[in-house]
Image (cartoon, helix red, strand yellow):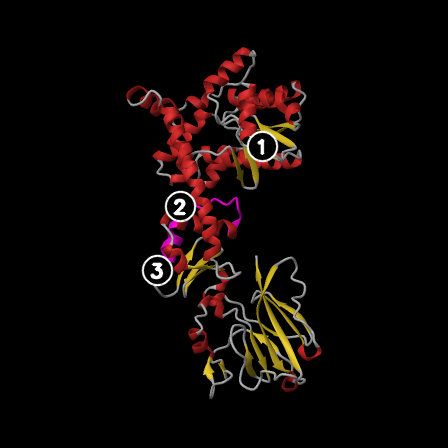
Amino acid sequence: MWRKILHIIEEHGLLAGCGGVMAAVSGGSDSVAMLYILNHLRRKLGYRLCVGHLDHRIRGHESEADADFVRRLSWKMGLPVAVGRMDVPRMAARKGISLEMAARTARYAFLKEAAVEMACDCVAVGHTADDQVETILLHFVRGAAPDGLGGMDYRTSLEGLNVVRPLLDVTRGELAVFLKAHHLDWREDASNQDTAHLRNRVRHELLPLLESRFNPRIRKAVLRMAELIRDDAEALWLQAEKELQKCRVGDTFELQTDRLRLLLPAVRRRVIVGWLREAFGGGSNIDRNTVAAVERLALKDSGTHLLNISGARIIECSYGRLRILARWDVGGDQRPFRIRLPLPGSVRIAEAGVQISAFRADKGDGCPGGDHGGRKAFLWDKVEIDAARVGRAGIYVRSRLPGDRMRPLGMQGSRKLQDILVDLKVPRSKRGRLPLFECRGELIWFPGYRPASGWKAREGEAAWRICVWTERG
């Protein structure tokens, strides 16, 4: 058994870079066996070993006895142990979720906190090959996406927590033989027999039925299928990562819908998942309904369409672009602004998400972006304005006002700003945040367009060089 677990750890690089490992021990047979094995291997592999246990308070005094058992076992092995306590039944009732989901959420939240406190880089959990089979069948009966039929990975990240599964190729039968051979004790969880829980029905009813009536080697068949699905999924994800970069609009966070439409559905959906995970964090759980809704949005032919995907976030599809907006970007909640531009100097306009720099171009000054306070920023546009015409009047940066007009360079007369923005295909959601530059009561420029007639500096004349930096992330 030692050699088999060692082979799994080394083959999949489970503990690479893990100076400290926390074993998540419930007190049951699987996690107890894992703890003994990891303790046996720790000197050979050179990691520190700690123990983590959460008392869910699901089984009353039995839960307390489980916690005492794990605490004493850890002390006996000379290992530091963190024991937490949380009223999971109350949490499930308050959030309106299943007891199983509440227990899982509470457990990983505790393990993440405990791992940080005890300087552990990863958490080892005792999922076995049998758990893998049950998980895959659970996903199947619930109608999971193809990736769900690939089951659990040997190493994953859950909400920023590095989780490893060193027993994923080991059966419960093998662990039972190991425990018996080494005369090891563990705790029995009576709730594992309760068929009110769907997983227990899969374990005690569905799997025995499949083995007796359909295929006596169904477990191996399911595991073989899952391995093939994971291989295919890996290839699709690698392709999706490449396509995501190709779908981007320059260095922005927007996606081109025309390019998305050309992709095969399996790749397109993964591109969308990757894009959303970048927006909301790598550990975010992006459900398939959200992905399907974003995909339908991207496939719409024309017009501006909005999709509410969370309490504060909206996805807009407009002019062939997908973009993620804050709720206040949409409709009438946009905040007006009007700021005098320092000449020379820099200013940040939070309402527009930009940093603006102004320097004398005729004196050879460059276009530095200034201090962005740790925010990523990219040069959006720049212009050189006639400094003599500006004089002492100064330049103001403001948001749109009803009836705004502009006299574009090279055109006779003025045009409504609204018509200019429509021609430029500027999305409605961006119009309220667009920084407009005004001098002497006249609109003289905005990024992405040419300056107004009579305001562009001529070569060799005194000029203010204005640079607009847009913030990302």
Q: Is residue 310 visible?
A: no
For disc 3, the marked residue is 300
* x 48%, y 58%: residue: 248
Q: Amino acid at mark 2?
A: Arg
* x 36%, y 36%: residue: 142
Q: Amino acid at mark 1?
A: Val
Is 158 above or below relative to 215?
Answer: below
Residue nearest the viewer, comparing 358 with 57: 358
Is 290 above or below relative to 324?
Answer: above
Q: Is residue 237 left or right of residue 106?
A: left
Residue nearest the viewer, comparing 243 with 278: 243
Start and end of the magenta stretch? Answer: 280-299
Which corner quadrant holds the C terminus? bottom right
Q: Position of residue 47 (x, y in %)?
A: 65, 29
For disc 2, the marked residue is 288
Q: Which mark is residue 123?
A: 1
